[in-house]
Amino acid sequence: MDFVEPINKLLPRGLKTYLNSFPLLREVIERALLAPVDKALNGREIPLYTGIRTMLSPNEREYLYRLAKEVTPNGVIVELGCYAGGSAILLGLGARVSGSHVYSFDPFDSHMDRQTEESDGSPHLNIKKPSRAHVEETLRKRGLDDVITLCEGFSLDMAGRWGNGNINLLWIDGNHAHASQDYYAWRTHLAPDAMIVFHDTNHGRNGFTLGREDTTQSVENLLEQENIRNVYRVDAITAFCLQ
């Protein structure tokens, strides 16, 4: 989402199109428009407008950043599903504070036949996916290329090749049809007190209309099977700690 939703509804289409052609000018204008709102949000470390292209809500962005920020020094964060790098940036910003490192997995624009075959109905497969090189450049411009390592490949394949130590934070936001499979594939690599975080869940809970029905059901089944009691929910995020 290029514009924060309330601002997006107020701007004429022609102006939005014009500003999209000048991202730096757009950023200056949006920051100025949203600065008073940001000041009113006590305790928020990630502003409403970040210039980061992501499907995460403001609450989700804040939560993901704080989880990464609280990882133990020299800890390991793994992201399953990078796409254009939006959530990786948030994890990287937190990792910079905690002194941890992020490993982000995605097939990017490779093996599109397999991605289509295994598609979960995700709309982003209908457009050209970013390449690994493109996302690397995005991270470099943000000054995060030293705290984030991009790994090109499919999550379920790469789990068996993992060799970078116990994982302290596992963020699962890849192929939504594989959400619970991703967890079980990576579970043996988790630290005893690891935090596991799923996106696109909580559909239908307390009238919540976002998230996905299939991912929600898959994760709820997992929580029941694993007898997980301490569950944290932020918009479409569901998280739990192994301890």
Image (cartoon, rainbow, N blue to C red):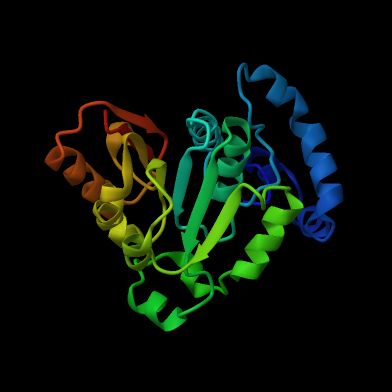
Residue 139 sits above or below residue 64 on the image: below
Q: Residue at x 41, y 83 (%)?
A: 113
Where residue 87 sits in the image (x, y, percent)?
55, 48
- Residue 31 percent location from the top left of the image: 78, 36
* 91 on left or right of 123: right
Q: How many marks?
A: 0
Quadrant housing the C terminus: top left
User: Which residue is depicted at the point 47% across and 44% down?
Assistant: 77
Q: Position of residue 161 (x, y in %)?
A: 36, 64
Quadrant position of residue 23:
bottom right
Q: In this rendering, is residue 150 above or below 132?
A: above
- Residue placed furthest toward the bottom: 113
- In the depicted view, which residue is nearer to us: 122 or 221? 221
Residue occupying the point 60% across, 71% down: 131
Query: As displayed, is residue 158 above or below residue 203?
Result: below
Q: Position of residue 22 (x, y in %)?
A: 85, 57
Task: Identify the image quadrant of residue 128.
Answer: bottom right
Residue 208 visible in the snapshot = no
Q: Is 145 placed left or right of 178 in the picture? A: right
User: Can residue 201 be seen at all in this image of the molecule?
Assistant: yes
Q: For this rendering, which residue is in front, 66 or 126?
A: 66
Compared with 81, 200 (above or below) is above
